[in-house]
């Protein structure tokens, strides 16, 4: 078999099920090998930022490594933004990046680049395949590296001649990593803190906020001790909705985050780091935890976070969590002006239980979050690394991961333009995704940031850089051009009707919601 075939057999044996791909000339032998293995589903993305974003969404839902295929340095360069987001989300991803044949690199061909240098900033593990005889072992190591807790980005660079040279057999996969058991001393230490100062403490989690067992353990601890339940701002997913234990996400805005943490004397960290502001501001702190507050780690990211929380709840003799019931009466139908509050209320009325909400609403996110807290229980995926253009690809990858669940993407119009090619993949794969584009026709979040950083945008030339209304982006035309059914609404009533209809049908659909902020 070829080196590419040897590698693919190992990847399939290691549990890889999906390959999100944007191939080029150097990857043709890998593509041929991929097509011969029915265990791995190939999914085409028309831009590498879509490919990496889909891999992130898939990994967040399944917990399994997704595979990407990209072409040379420019290819992974195009995919870096969403690899950055995936790395912040701790999503397991295995990248295969094709490169020129080893003997061709001495020539200054047009696409020659330092692939390893480009990949290194967004790779936790990086290797250049050296031989067809060892490339499958490289693949086994890449999957094992991606699976290392809590999830890593592994990149294997595959020269074309390594892919096409023949070899014999393939390597077996490496054993899956096992989480470290809870640290008993840490559990006792945290239990003592919470017994003494529980009402002035906060417990900050990462992965536990996205699954039932984690929420139940957190509820036991916090209801028993009075500690505040918090989830990391960059957590990969959060379980939200009526009947679920409410956990406050650390807000994006520094001044709001400071108010959430105000009065905390002890911050207990479970699998995460102390919160910091996304940017420096002249009048707001970068370090968000109150001065003199003590930091104590319950567990590190290589531990099983949920198991550590359950052990802490048991150490405290906390009673079992009482599971709430979702509300039986839906919120009232919104009327009048179409704004983020009206859209959030409609989502609370119509989101199916078990659905997935990929939210990159940016400036409209806080208003949406208030309303969707009353929706049926669902998973909320947000932008983890701050690089824009994550929402549509993450929704697409999540839909590949969960073909039986409704996926809704609430998407700011500016960041939607970064990766709208994912709509084409949704149409091609017939995915059940509803995309809601919040068309306020401006970079509204940057308008707010101008004041917050103490800058001024007085000139028409500078102000124009924050304006998306000249010309107006026609989202209905763009979606239809990529095979996605689309409609435009500009009232709360029309949006509610349209969303209700979208929830009753399957397949990709886009709603352009023209906001009147």
Image: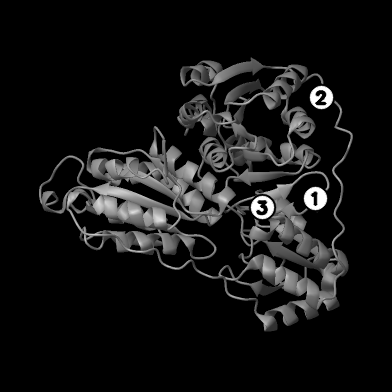
Residue 46, horizontal then vertical, whole percent:
39, 32
The residue sitting at 74% across, 77% down in the picture is 190
Q: Residue at label 2?
A: 334
Q: Residues within 10 Å of mark 3 (few under 14, many from 20)?
A: many
Q: Is residue 84 visible?
A: yes
Q: Evaluate if marks 2 and 1 touch, with contact meaning CB atoms under 8 Å apart.
A: no
Q: Residues within 10 Å of mark 2 (few under 14, many from 20)?
A: many
Specify the color scheme: one colour
Residue toward you, 455 or 205: 205
Q: Residue at label 3?
A: 254
Specify which label sits upstream in the sequence, 1 or 3: 1
Residue 465, horizontal then vertical, whole percent:
49, 29
Report the residue that reaches farthest toward the bottom: 185
Q: CA distance from mark 1 to mark 3?
A: 27 Å
Q: Secondary structure at mark 3?
A: helix
Residue 60, horizontal then vertical, whole percent:
57, 50
Image quarter for residue 23? top left
Q: Residue at label 1?
A: 244
Q: Relative to residue 467, is residue 33 depicted above or below?
A: below
The residue sitting at 51% across, 47% down in the picture is 56
Disc number lying in front (2 or 1): 1
The residue sitting at 82% across, 76% down in the picture is 316
- In the picture, measured across the screen, residue 467 lies left or right of residue 41, that is right
């Amino acid at each position: 078999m070829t080196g590419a075939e040897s590698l693919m057999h190992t990847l399939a044996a290691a549990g890889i099920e999906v390959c999100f791909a944007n191939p080029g000339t150097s990857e043709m032998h890998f593509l041929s090998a991929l097509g011969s293995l029915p265990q791995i589903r190939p999914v085409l993305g028309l831009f590498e930022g879509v490919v990496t974003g889909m891999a992130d969404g898939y990994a967040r839902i399944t917990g399994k490594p997704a595979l990407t295929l990209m072409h040379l340095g420019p290819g992974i360069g195009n995919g870096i933004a969403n690899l950055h987001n995936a790395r912040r989300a701790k999503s397991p991803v295995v990248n295969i990046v094709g490169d020129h044949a080893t003997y061709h690199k001495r020539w200054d061909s047009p696409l020659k680049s330092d692939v390893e240098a480009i990949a290194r900033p967004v790779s936790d593990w990086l290797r250049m395949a050296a031989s067809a005889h060892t490339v499958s072992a490289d693949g086994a190591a890449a999957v094992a590296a991606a699976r290392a807790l809590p999830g890593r980005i592994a990149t294997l660079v595959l020269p074309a001649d390594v892919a096409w040279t023949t070899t014999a057999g393939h390597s077996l996969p490496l054993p899956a990593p096992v989480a470290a058991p809870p640290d008993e001393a840490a559990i006792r230490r945290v239990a003592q803190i919470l017994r003494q100062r529980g009402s002035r403490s906060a417990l900050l989690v990462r992965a536990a906020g996205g699954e039932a067992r984690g929420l139940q353990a957190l509820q036991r601890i916090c209801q028993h001790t009075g500690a505040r339940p918090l989830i990391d701002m960059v957590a990969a997913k959060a379980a939200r909705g009526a009947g679920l234990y409410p956990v406050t996400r650390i807000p994006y805005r520094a001044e709001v985050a400071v108010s959430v943490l105000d009065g905390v004397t002890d911050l207990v960290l479970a699998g995460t780091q102390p919160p910091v502001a996304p940017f420096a501001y002249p009048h707001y702190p970068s370090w968000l935890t109150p001065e003199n507050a003590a930091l104590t780690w319950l567990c590190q990211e290589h531990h099983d976070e949920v198991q550590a929380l359950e052990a802490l709840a048991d150490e405290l003799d906390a009673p079992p969590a009482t599971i709430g019931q979702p509300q039986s009466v839906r919120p009232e139908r919104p009327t009048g002006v179409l704004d983020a509050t009206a859209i959030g209320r409609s989502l609370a009325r119509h989101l199916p239980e078990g659905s997935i909400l990929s939210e990159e609403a940016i400036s409209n996110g806080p208003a949406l979050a208030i309303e969707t807290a009353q929706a049926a229980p669902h998973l909320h995926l947000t932008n983890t690394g701050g690089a824009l253009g994550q929402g549509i690809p993450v929704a697409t990858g999540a839909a590949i991961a969960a073909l039986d669940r409704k996926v809704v993407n609430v998407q700011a119009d500016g960041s939607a333009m970064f990766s709208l090619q994912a709509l084409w993949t949704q149409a091609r794969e017939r995915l059940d995704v509803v995309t809601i584009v919040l068309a306020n026709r401006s970079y509204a979040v940057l308008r707010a940031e101008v004041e917050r950083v103490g800058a001024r945008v007085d000139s028409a030339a500078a102000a124009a850089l924050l304006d998306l209304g000249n010309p107006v982006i026609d989202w209905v035309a763009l979606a239809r051009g990529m095979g996605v059914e689309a409609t435009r609404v500009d009232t709360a009533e029309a949006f509610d009707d349209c969303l209700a209809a979208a929830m009753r049908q399957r397949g990709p659909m886009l709603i352009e919601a023209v906001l009147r902020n």
